[in-house]
Image (cartoon, grey):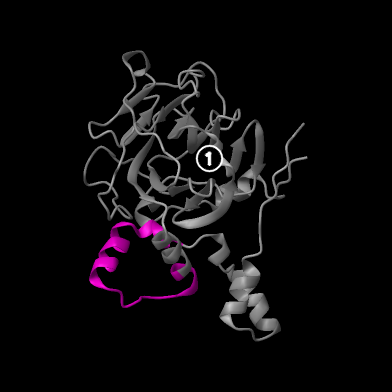
Amino acid sequence: MLTSRSRGFDDRQRAAKPYCQCWSDSRPAVWDNSSGCRCGEHSPISEWCWEAPDTSSSSWVTITQNQKQVTFHPFYSSGTAAVKGDTPLVNDYHYYWEVKMLTEPYGTDIMVGLGTSKVDMADSLFKFTSFLGRDAESYGLSYTGALRHNATVTKDNTGFCKGSIIGVKVDLWQGTLEFYLNRKSQGISFYNLRRHQALYPMICSTAAKSSMRLIYAASWQASLMVDAVKILAASVHGELALPPGLQSTLKSQFWLTLPNQKCIIDEEELKTETSQRQKSLTNLTLSSGMKRKHWHRRW
């Protein structure tokens, strides 16, 4: 039986937040204009782009000339449209990319994730469905907070909304998939990804005139340096006096030092623990890092 939290859809939607305050204005904005919100888009790194659709799919998906911003169903929606990255992910590399939600999500589903080359991107153009995670060939995070894979689902996360930055970290050395919302880890969601020959970043939507923008995409070959940086980021709080070369690398590859769920102290937990007894920050960090999600197959 699949386990999930008792929070409902409304609770997750209330918890969804934009990355910055630029999105507090409810008036519509022209997002193909360079004057649109660029908060969080401080690095120009983009190792891949969205694959341009063929002519038969152009009425379902439009992509800007730089192949970073996608608008689904630009006229009206009659089903589910999806796009994938133009470059496959390969084993023994770490990958991280971010997309910004430019419109308010609604409808059956809007998802961010990845899948194999076996996923038929035009399979559901006339069907409203949660496209990613329907089978063993894809993985997805929904705007409702639901995680999907192989026809199983858990609603164990906060959803995302207009202005949210959704990050995807894929470790193809360990074979794990981890989602970030506004650069805060949601914990490792899936394991054993190395069994796939090739994986591609993917997004999908059933909502008319919904839009997302790829704002960052980078990778780094698995190495002792990457592991050392992760440990350093987990154990040190605040700025470090680093050599200029390493400082420059970590500025452009900021995702290498983003803390995962094991490093995050829940604020409420911290307040409770502090009021009960005085503990060191190290001990609190260790106790808060014991959480793990449990997945069970629905038979």
**For the N terminus, which image quadrant?**
top right
* Main SS class of the magenta portion in the image: helix
Note whether residue 20 is visible: no
* Up-down relation of residue 141 to residue 40 (above or below): above
Residue for point 32% across, 63% down: 250
Tell me residue 3's x, y (percent): 73, 45
Tell me residue 239's x, y (percent): 36, 75
Tell whether 111 sits left or right of 9.
left
Residue for point 65% across, 38% down: 153
Q: For the residue marked with disc 1, what is the amino acid?
A: Arg
Magenta part of the chain: 232-258
Is 135 in the magenta? no
Is 242 in the magenta? yes
Residue for point 30% across, 29% down: 63
| Image quadrant in which you'd find residue 133 | top right
Note whether residue 296 is visible: yes
**Element marked by disc 1:** helix
Find disc 1 in the rendering and name its residue: 194
Tell me residue 194's x, y (percent): 53, 40
**For the C terminus, which image quadrant?**
top right
Q: Residues within 10 Å of mark 1 (few under 14, many from 20)?
A: some
The extreme bottom residue here reads 278
Number of marks in picture = 1
* Up-down relation of residue 66 to residue 258 (above or below): above
Instruction: Please state which of residues 181 and 73 is positioned toward the viewer in this rendering.
Output: 181
Tell whether 197 sits left or right of 74.
right
Tell me residue 125's x, y (percent): 48, 18
The extreme top residue here reads 56
